[in-house]
Image: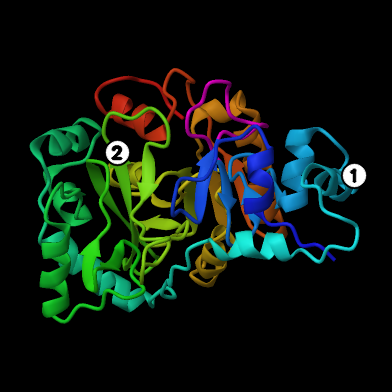
Amino acid sequence: MLEFQMQDVIPLLPIPQPPYGRTSYYIPCPDCDDAGTRRGHLNINLVKNVFRCPRCDFSGGVLDLYARYASIPREDVLDALRSRLKIPDNAMGLKLRKAREKIPAVREYPLADIETRDATYRALLSKLSLASDHRNNLLSRGLSPDAIERGLYRTTPILGEAALAKQLHEAGCYLSGVPGFFRHDNHWTLAKSWRGIIIPVRDLNGRIQGLQIRRDNVKEKKFRWLSSAEHQDGCPAETWVHMAGPPQGRVLLIEGPLKADIVHHLTGESVIAVPGVNALEQLERALGALKKHGVSKIMTCFDMDYLRNFHVQKGYTQMVWMLHNMGFRFGTYLWEPHYNGLDDFIWECNMGCNHTV
């Protein structure tokens, strides 16, 4: 039986081709990205031979991808591919296996334990500083100087990534399995990143699980994880859930670790944050841990655009069912849509408005 791979069918489809040497890449999603989007949400993995859009959950394998873009039923895909690739009925796929062998093999490390990641990230952050424009941005959003210092926010390094990794390695920090670090020419280095604010993402015990970056001067995909996926001896980041403040009986559930930190600082409430309303992979695990800490009620506080964004509404619905199935009491906070995020609304109120949630 023939086994088609992504590398076999992508050249036949009207989609962007994979960059040289990459084992996965992003293209505009046909279901949820706007026309003209240059770099969309649909990830195509050439090694695992799968695709998925975390925004609308359009996903599947090789045959599903071909069926969608060729606009034919999935059950007709094999015959269509045989015809287009001129494969005889008795072929065993030797040509396809040769194409598959061209995909570069990149060894990645499994994710290090939380204690290792926390120690390494804290050591890294101790060697970085926060640029004045980033400090002013955080102050303008409601964080105090003390909160900024406690939060360990930093500016991404522009140069010297290899030197930073060398210093950490020589100081005894473990870099293998820590997202963001990888080997280049047999030497450890740190993945280059767009200039922006580094946001530590913490677990319920305050340990740093991973680092998110709020990138400067971009309109799409403003928040990215520090990751070394697809690099030699690198490690991919996960969609970690962030906890701001110790768990209490009621916890606010918000989108975005930085917003969680701001809301916690301004209100004293316990806040848990997902990196996106459709990024729910780790939320169930975090909610289970909150339950053990006595949390019984969750109030959702997502940006007000969820009222008009179908894809956000879909993720919100899935999340509500998760809360219901886990036995939480839950509700939703609403505020004036003029303020998209709860952090903006609360900060404006603290500055003198008389509105309430």
Q: Disc 2 residue type?
A: Arg
Judge by depth and name the residue closer to the eye, 163 or 287: 163
Is residue 356 depicted above or below 82 in this figure?
above
* Sequence-wise first label, 2 or 1: 1
Q: Disc 1 residue type?
A: Asp
Query: At x 12% / y 50%, what residue is drawn?
Result: 159
Q: Which residue is mark 1?
A: 76
Judge by depth and name the residue closer to the eye, 329 or 181: 181
- Asked whether residue 36 is drawn in magenta, I would say yes
The span shown in magenta is 28-41
Query: At x 65% / y 55%, what residue is drawn?
Result: 50
Between marks 2 and 1 in the image, the one whose residue lies nearer the viewer: 1
The image's mark for residue 138 is: none
Magenta stretch, main secondary structure, is: loop
Query: At x 72% / y 44%, what residue is drawn?
Result: 65
Judge by depth and name the residue closer to the eye, 8 or 165: 8
Q: Position of residue 198 (x, y in %)?
A: 25, 49
Judge by depth and name the residue closer to the eye, 28 or 238: 28
Q: Position of residue 15 (x, y in %)?
A: 61, 35
Query: Circle 2 — which element?
Result: strand
Measure how far apart labels 2 and 1 are at the Cα level.
Answer: 44 Å
Crowding around mark 1 (Cα neighbors within 10 Å: few <14, some 14 to 19, many 20+) is: few
- Asked whether residue 63 is drawn in magenta, I would say no
Say left or right for 152 vs 5. left
Q: Which residue is mark 2?
A: 215
Crowding around mark 2 (Cα neighbors within 10 Å: few <14, some 14 to 19, many 20+) is: many
Display colour scheme: rainbow
Q: Position of residue 47 (x, y in %)?
A: 58, 62
Say left or right for 192 vs 229. left
Residue 284 seen anywhere in this rendered image of the structure: yes
Query: At x 55% / y 50%, what residue is drawn?
Result: 279
Q: Position of residue 250 (x, y in %)?
A: 49, 54
